[in-house]
Amino acid sequence: MANPFEKRASEYRRDDEAFLPLVTPDPLITFFKKHADDGKLYDQLSVIIGAPGSGKTMVARCLPSILPRMTPEEALEVTKIYSVSGALPADSPLMLQRPFRSPHYTISNAGLVGGGRNIRPGEITLSHRGVLFLDELPEFSHTSLESLRQPLEDKVVTISRVSGTVTYPASFMLVSAMNPCPCGFFSDPKKECTCSSSAVTRYQTRVSGPLLDRIDVFVEVPPVEYERLVDEAPAQDSSHARQRVEQAREIQRERFKDNGFLCNSEMGPAEVWKSCPLDESAKALLQAATQRLNLSARAFHRILKVSRTIADLDTAQDIGVAHLAEALQYRSRGFVG
């Protein structure tokens, strides 16, 4: 199966993607490469899809190196959580690094969400103000995956037991990785997939539609070519990407200084309309995308939030058509081609 990002926009003809010719006549991989090379990071939720060994886990584990540094308020929030859970390092009375949690897919629902006889925070809360990385996403239990839905929306998790009810903070960046099929080589250009169509469909539908609708950025990671593996050219340092991310986060702090928000992902519908002005071309593109992609109200607002973040990284006051088009490109269109 050919990589769809190598097609020109005018050749990208599926009905639900007919708006893309409005964006650029160039190959889509060229159009979006600039933004990928700039090291853009979103306050949103991501799924990384690719064959085994393509670098999905490595990409996720590199995220903390480009996340903005925690503010004193965020550091105190995280420190309180780790103190309550008994996980505060003995040599560090104050948590200064953003959490990065990567539980195994065999984790229990109580371990992920929190609970127990004496209610304790789970991995969701221990990831507060940081990253929760779920590798092999479809392998997690259905109950565990569905339990993510409410915290992703409300930024808190409420646990009720016989002994009482506790509400913990849960504002985290969800990053997950998955193979496209059980064998891992569905759509691989060089290695044949050995899975049946029904097996691929069963594997991919382990992640429910309502959960997918809450995820903003879907990235397909292609296999790494030999030339890239032996290329000795120096790679871009993470400090450059972090500088751009911190600049965008500072723009967001100034925008929300009277609202108590820290970043775009925390906006509600009222704040979205106030903070996400669109130019006329972007409005036309959004209207076409909403109708042709049959976007839910949640997806509509999430696309605007991602567009706002992309515009912040470009230090643009208004959201342009290129910002909106990139946000739309990251939405899921279904895994099975």
Image (tube, helix red, strand yellow):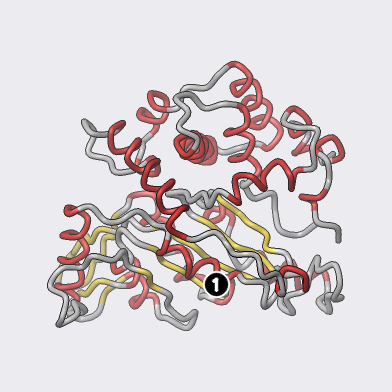
Residue to which mark 1 is pinned: 58
- Circle 1 packing at 10 Å, graded few (<14), some (14-19), many (20+), is few
Report x, y in % for residue 296.
Answer: 56, 38
Q: Residue at x 67, y 59 (%)?
A: 220
Q: Is residue 214 left or right of residue 110?
A: right
Q: Residue at x 59, y 21 (%)?
A: 283
Let me know if residue 95 appears in the view: yes
Q: Residue at x 20, y 81 (%)?
A: 117
Report x, y in % for residue 4.
Answer: 80, 51
Report x, y in % for residue 316.
Answer: 48, 28
Q: Is residue 319 left or right of residue 288?
A: left
Report x, y in % for residue 290.
Answer: 63, 31
* Residue occupying the far top of the picture: 280
Closest to the observer, 332 or 91: 91
Q: Quadrant of residue 326?
A: top right
Q: Quadrant of residue 81?
A: bottom left
Residue 73 to residue 204: above or below: above
* Residue occupying the far front of the picture: 233
Which quarter of the image is occupied by the C terminus? bottom right
Which quarter of the image is occupied by the N terminus? bottom right
* Residue occupying the far left of the picture: 93
Closest to the observer, 130 or 180: 130
Residue 20 to residue 280: above or below: below
Residue 191 to residue 287: above or below: below
Q: Is residue 205 left or right of residue 114?
A: right
Secondary structure at badge 1 equals: helix
Q: Residue at x 21, y 31 (%)?
A: 258
Closest to the observer, 47 or 197: 47
Q: Which amino acid lies under the numbered mark 1 shown in the image of this protein?
A: Met
